[in-house]
Image (cartoon, helix red, strand yellow):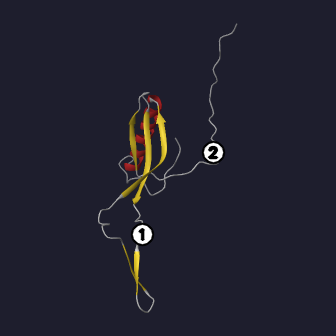
Amino acid sequence: MSPLRHPNKIRYRYSIDKDARLYAAHGVWGGINPQGEIELNFYHESDALPQTTECVVAPDGTLGPENLPDGFEQRDIIRHIHSRVLLNYETARAVLEWLEERVATLEMEDGEEPLFSGHSGREQ
């Protein structure tokens, strides 16, 4: 019986789910769950909208400035969690390394000017 042979290469093919969406992330909230996985909850932030606003109508029918309701002096920020991700230790380490490499590329390369120009390669 011959020993099990492993392939020389593995090719990964990418497929994007039709429901996949691209989200901006202003931050992440999470921690380590009871199963020892890292839980990441990505969010974006925006100002809270008031429930109502009012405009005074002048006698000639023109609208005055839009006014916020009384007591709307505190600024509330909404953090909308749009994506939740669980990572095991090995995957978290790989993502950390990948991010560190990309951040280093954005910061500087060989003492030259920063490479970031608003566009970046997305390869892994």
The amino acid type found where label 2 is placed reads Asp
Residue at the extreme top: 1
**Classed neighbour count for the residue bearing mark 2: other residues with Cα under 10 Å, few (<14), some (14–19), many (≥20):** few
In the depicted structure, whether residue 66 falls above or below residue 47: below
The amino acid type found where label 1 is placed reads Thr
Residue 54 sits in quarter: bottom left
In the depicted structure, whether residue 56 falls above or below residue 28: below
At mark 1, the secondary structure is loop
At mark 2, the secondary structure is loop
Residue 71 sits in quarter: bottom left
Residue 2 sits in quarter: top right
Q: Nearer the viewer, residue 39 or 72?
A: 72
- Which image quarter holds the N terminus? top right
Q: Residue at x 63, y 45 (%)?
A: 17
Residue ID for mark 2: 17
Q: Which of 60 and 16 is in front in this view?
A: 60
Question: How many numbered marks, from 0 up?
Answer: 2
Residue ID for mark 1: 52
Please provide percent x and percent y for residue 98: 45, 39
Q: Residue at x 49, y 55 (%)?
A: 119
**Classed neighbour count for the residue bearing mark 1: other residues with Cα under 10 Å, few (<14), some (14–19), many (≥20):** few
In the depicted structure, whether residue 13 falls above or below residue 105: above
Please provide percent x and percent y for residue 35: 44, 27
In the depicted structure, whether residue 44 falls above or below residue 36: below
Residue at the extreme right: 1
- The residues bearing labels 2 and 1 have C-alpha atoms spaced at a distance of 39 Å
